[in-house]
Image (tube, rainbow, N blue to C red):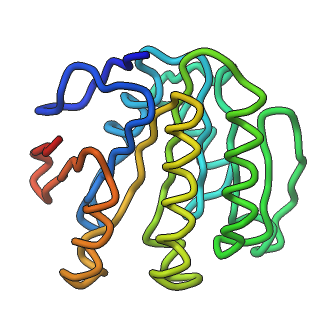
């Protein structure tokens, strides 16, 4: 199954199972790329957020007119911060950004319980590394990439380039089928 991509300078389509790394400046405006990725050619989407709460994710989807009916949000922040949370069909929670097993499990549940074209956005790998470490975050990313492949889905994983050394950046780049690089001036390059 092929998926259309609405990412500047990237291929028009990618096959199911494709994992894409979005490398961006730590202050980079990734919302447009993320929401274009999610809303193009999609039946169901899982938005994994280790950086913002479900409420903030919902506001982003609303602002960019992404069909929220198709979205499941996995919030990894609210429990740890003590915010009120109401689990629903479309909003799931894990205990903290370092609950990597929980994040992988919820991704598996989402992919096993939905059909059609599925997209997963993970914002952000940087936070997973910050809360745990690069090795554990890398293992979780690999597990999610395997799930995408197994279920013919595609994923976009955010990584802030300013906070990782070159070796760490290269290690994560090498795990993905495609890398989209967002520069500080907003220009986009892609390598697939």
Number of marks in picture: 0
Vertical relation: 173 (above or below) 145: below
- Residue 191 percent across, percent down from the top left: 13, 45
Q: Is residue 53 left or right of residue 182?
A: right
Which of the two residues, 21 or 153, is positioned nearer the viewer here? Answer: 153
Which of the two residues, 100 or 92, is positioned nearer the viewer here? Answer: 100
The quarter of the image holding the C terminus is top left
- Residue 169 percent across, percent down from the top left: 25, 73
- Residue 10 percent across, percent down from the top left: 17, 32
The quarter of the image holding the N terminus is top left
Q: Residue at x 57, y 57 (%)?
A: 143
Vertical relation: 160 (above or below) 66: below
Q: Residue at x 51, y 30 (%)?
A: 153
Which of the two residues, 172 or 51, is positioned nearer the viewer here? Answer: 172
Q: Is residue 113 left or right of residue 188?
A: right
- Residue 170 percent across, percent down from the top left: 22, 71
Q: Residue at x 25, y 70 (%)?
A: 161
Q: Is residue 141 left or right of residue 98?
A: left
Vertical relation: 56 (above or below) 41: below
Which of the two residues, 16 or 102, is positioned nearer the viewer here? Answer: 16
Q: Quadrant of residue 20?
A: top left
Q: Quadrant of residue 90?
A: top right
Vertical relation: 179 (above or below) 68: below
């Amino acid at each position: 199954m092929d998926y259309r991509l609405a990412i500047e300078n990237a291929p028009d389509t990618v096959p199911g199972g494709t994992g894409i790394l979005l490398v961006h400046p730590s202050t980079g405006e990734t919302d447009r790329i993320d929401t274009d990725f999610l809303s193009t050619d999609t039946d169901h989407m899982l938005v994994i957020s280790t950086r913002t709460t479900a409420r903030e994710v919902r506001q982003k989807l609303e602002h960019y007119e992404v069909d929220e009916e198709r979205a499941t949000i996995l919030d990894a922040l609210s429990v740890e911060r003590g915010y009120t949370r109401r689990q629903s069909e479309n909003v799931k929670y894990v205990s903290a950004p370092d609950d990597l097993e929980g994040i992988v499990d919820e991704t598996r549940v989402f992919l096993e319980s939905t059909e059609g074209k599925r997209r997963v956005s993970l914002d952000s790998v940087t936070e997973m590394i910050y809360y745990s470490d690069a090795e554990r975050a890398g293992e979780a990313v690999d597990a999610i990439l395997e799930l995408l492949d197994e279920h013919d889905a595609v994923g976009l994983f955010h990584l802030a380039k300013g906070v990782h050394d070159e070796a760490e950046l290269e290690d994560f780049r090498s795990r993905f089928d495609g890398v989209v690089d967002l520069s500080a001036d907003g220009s986009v390059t892609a390598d697939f």
